[in-house]
Amino acid sequence: MKLFTKPKSDEDRLIEGCIAGKRDMQRLLYDLYSKKMMVVCLRYAPTTFEAEDIMQDAFVKVFNNIQNFKRDCPLEFWVRRIMVNTALKHLRSKQLLTVSHEAEEVANLSADDVSLSGYTMDELLSMIQSLAPRYRMVFNLYAIEGYNHKEIGEMLGISEGTSKSQYSRARAILQSMLLRQEKKLKEHVISN
Amino acid sequence: MSSATNNKRGSLENEFQRRMQDAEASPSADLWARIDHNLTVQENGQYKRGMLFYRQLAAACITLLLVAGGFAAYYFGGSAPAPMAQVQQPNGTIASAVPAGTDTSEESLTTDEAIAAAMQLAVQPLALEPAGQEPVRQQVAIADNRSEGAAEQETQSVAAGFKIEAPVVASVTATSDPSAWHSVPAGKYIPTYQSRKGSREDLATSSMFSRLKSMHGAFTERPASASGFVSAGAPAFPQASPEISDDFRTLSEVVMNRMKQLKAEQEAVQQMYKSEKKTLAAAGGATDTGKEKASAGRWSLGMAYAPSYFEQNIGIPTQMMGPMNSFASFAPPTAMQRSARMMDDAREEHEQEVEPGFSFGVEAKAGFKIGKKWKLLSGLGFTQNTARSKSSYVIQQFWREPGTEKTETPGATTIFLPSISNNYASDSLSVAQTDEFNVLYRYRHLTVPAGVQYEGKIGKDWFWFAGGGVAANVLLQTAIIASSAEVRNTEYDLSDDNSPFRKLQWSGNVTAGVGKRLSNNVSVAIGPEYRAYFDTMLSSPEKAQAPQGKPYTMGINLALNYDLGPGRK
């Protein structure tokens, strides 16, 4: 009789079901995380179709490798990391991570006067998606995922300095976009 | 604002992170269906790969058993010499000495003719000759059609299930009767593919069998007077009765039929798997090409070279030999004592001087991977083991012909041969001391190894291995070669009944070492190898005058391996 067995949480049962290959458990896990992970994929992919491709590959990887999940972090974090890695691999396979130069003017603005409260999620996503692949990647990894430039350099196969310079440029482009949006909004208000 | 400022986390980063961290967006409704489909495809693929693996494993085991069985049947199957060997006998040999019409000669003739007839029967239906030449051929053709029909039926059922082309049918049809080819339903197979495949196989089979036919022609066109086993005016082999059974022939037929059947099954399974993957890929399902490639490369080919140290462990007596007793009756006491002392000196010299010579083995092996680490190995090899000694004594034996005073001698030899067997009796021996000369003992074996090997990773390209196995060693030739012109060289062939050496020797070997992958497919390996023979070198150690040890070799194994298929990625 097991007196000191730790009661299994729902997440444990979910993971065990997925390891056993039970399709209903896999569906449950998918339902649990698909919406959040879709946003992750949308941030890395230029289009919704590609985001769904990435997500499909990533979830298959999740189910194939869930027995390797060591439970040293939340399951959501582990799934998110697989999404990010799959997105990186996807873009690398399409050779979208080559350095490109933005044609648009980059504004030098202070970061303090930026507020995103007036923007919808779709607007913010479309701004990120409009960045060049390499800039989008570095911005996502640094600003949103929270990796530092050394880690990003290792992940993308670039130097730390390159990561910093690309992030700086990506940030400036985004600020420029935000400024233009704000100007348009002000003009619209004045004209009305 | 400088770029340095742009690298620091500010409100922009925090704001983006806050907004994005818990954001949600609904994927399209069919995304789960796609994932579900993908997982199902993978599960099916794994199942099929498993099935394919077990089929290949079964094929490998059967091939190994059949090769070993065929070899054993060939070796132990019968003492009747082959026709070519009889033809090559000089005048006055067994074939001509045995009176025609005796039971023994008739039996061996019948067996030889049956083998020849079976070879011809095997050749004729596939050589696409005009039908109706010989009535015997039709029986075989019926048997062939029956097996072809079974294969066709199986492939058709597979093709009907998965809507694929069936190359097995194409190949079989191409080699069968033309009327049977036309009976294939129109539109079911692609004609271009069929003809291409058929023509390629026709070329291969016709060229192979034309060579066999030319060999057979050489047999049948040989004048009857030139051979002891073809009687004058007797018809050639085609008239021989196919009903006469011969174990080796039956075994060969079973082997060939089983191999064909296995090949057809494997091709059908592989085709089925490929076509299903194509279908699923066309339907949008993702493929896992990496795993497929990994499963495709189970087979490998390898060559190994192993220079070694060979200890033959043949003992010779330290006491006076038996023949000296008879020697005593022909020689005065002083001469006998002197000769006996010299014999002892010769044996002592042999004991001191005998040492290992340069030995080596070469092997060509096919490997079959079981899982990721284990590998089954089998193939064919050749080993040449040598030992050497120095001698300064020449021994000569004499026999008296019964009823006459005439003596015979086979020629001078060393102390080695008269010392290893009691059968080496003679009426008298003469021992003479001469200048020192070298003696080489050389044993050439044909080996059929079978074994297993385990591989483990050391680094990216390096690996270690350990393995073991057994081998059947057939002694092809034994030679005792002396550097002195006074001493005759002695050679025993495989068919020499006078040879005191064991003709079939089993051995076991263990090896371990390290290897390096030079490319995805090519790897090299090196490591020590120990091979122990399970029996003594002499075929009758109980008749030897001294205890006999079991030989062994210790050497370095150098191997080159080529993985078939895509190799390691």
Image (cartoon, rainbow, N blue to C red):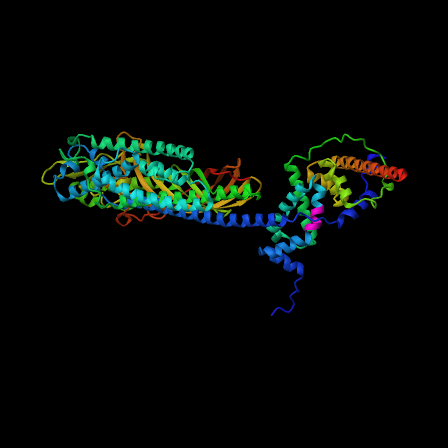
- Most distant residue in the front direction: A192
Give left or right: position of B33 versus B86: right
Magenta extent: A34-39
> Front-most of B98 and B172?
B172
Q: Specify whether B59 is left or right of A175.
A: left
Image mark count: 0
Residue B375 appears anywhere in the view: yes
Give residue B224's quadrant in the image: top left
State whether residue B387 appears in this view: no
Work out which residue is located at the far right of the displayed protein and give it: A190
Residue B42 in magenta stretch? no
Direction from residue B225 to residue A17 in the image, left or right: right
In percent of width and height, residue A189 lies at: 88, 40
- Considering every residue shown, the one lying at the far left of the view is B403
The residue lying toward the viewer, choosing from B379 and B300, is B300
Residue B163, x across and y down, in percent = 46, 43
